[in-house]
Amino acid sequence: MKAACLLAMALIVSSSLTSYADTTLSPQQVLQRLKEGNSRYLSGKSIHPRFDTSKRQQTAREGQKPIATILGCSDARVPPEMVFDQGFGDLFVVRVAGNVCAVAELASIEYGVKYLHTPVIVVMGHTKCGAVDGALSGAELRGSLPKLIALISPVTDKTKANHPDLTGNKLLDAAVEDNVRNSIAEILKNSPGLANLVEQKKLIIVGGVRNIENGSVRWLDK
Ligand SMILES: [Zn+2]
């Protein structure tokens, strides 16, 4: 059902996309826009761009034209549009607890890059992530949650093995960062098409961790 839905989206958009896609921004320019947006947000000077009625109607008429694809956590404290001070149609956002990258997330990310032509993917984790904490602690969970946590546990097991000295929030911080890096690795490993675009320098994939207390995004080195 999900695959059929995505395919339908692709067919609908690809027929009208060519003339609308903004290919003028380089990956570095997009990253700069996101950093500037986060700075505005941090300093209390968000401009909430493109939230108006005319922008909404334009996106309905002409289609979406995001500048970046974001894989982020579902946590209510990390809404990407607010964090980066962006508006309607600016970000193609995939949100899932623990910002994991399984098949549905990867397909959505591919859609954002291949059909909507975003030159940047941001994988954004955050401090005090409950999903990563759940994997670290091995807490007993119900329903479908154990299946999701099983995607994170191999990462947190490595974090524990690599940092036997860390406990509490410091261990969680290290695991959150490892989990972001793991999602980036999963994207590159499981999507040869995206890996190829990275190789050609047409796409960059960057990791970040949002501090939910001070609001900043710490960008991760390669
Ligand atoms: Zn989280």
Image: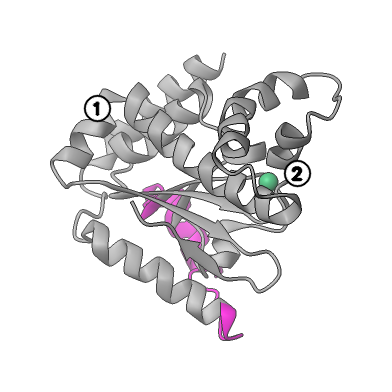
Residue 72, horizontal then vertical, whole percent: 56, 46
| Comparing labels 2 and 1, the label whose residue is closer to the camera | 2
The answer to which quarter of the image holds residue 74 is top right
Residue 105, image x, y percentages: 51, 30
Q: Amino acid at mark 1?
A: Gly
Q: Is residue 195 left or right of residue 199?
A: right
Tag 2: amino acid: Gly
Extreme residue in the left direction: 200
Residue at disc 2, CB closer than 8 Å to ligand 1? yes
User: What residue is shown at x 58% (from left), y 25% (from top)?
Assistant: 154
Q: Which residue is mark 2?
A: 130
Is residue 47 among the parts visible in the rendering? no
What range of the chain is rendered magenta?
42-68
Mark 1 surroundings within 10 Å by alpha-carbon count, few (fewer than 14), some (14 through 19), many (20 or more):
some
Residue 30 seen in render: yes
Image location of residue 89, percent across then percent down: 46, 55
Residue 62 is covered by the magenta coloring: yes
Q: Is residue 181 above or below residue 211?
A: above
On whether ligand 1 comes within 8 Å of the CB at mark 1, the answer is: no
Instruction: Say which element carries label 1.
Output: helix
Which residue corresponds to mark 1?
193
Is 93 included in the stretch rendered in magenta? Answer: no
Asked if residue 211 is positioned above or below residue 168 in the image, the reply reads: below
Q: Nearer the viewer, residue 42 or 167?
A: 167
| Figure colour scheme | one colour
Label 2 crowd bin: few (<14), some (14–19), many (20+), radius 10 Å: some
- Which of pointers 2 and 1 lies earlier in the amino acid sequence? 2
Q: Residue at x 48, y 16 (%)?
A: 3
Mark 2, secondary structure of its residue: helix
Question: Is 187 located above or below residue 39 in the figure?
Answer: above
In the picture, residue 106 is in which quadrant?
Answer: top left
The residue depicted at 42 percent of the width and 57 percent of the height is 220
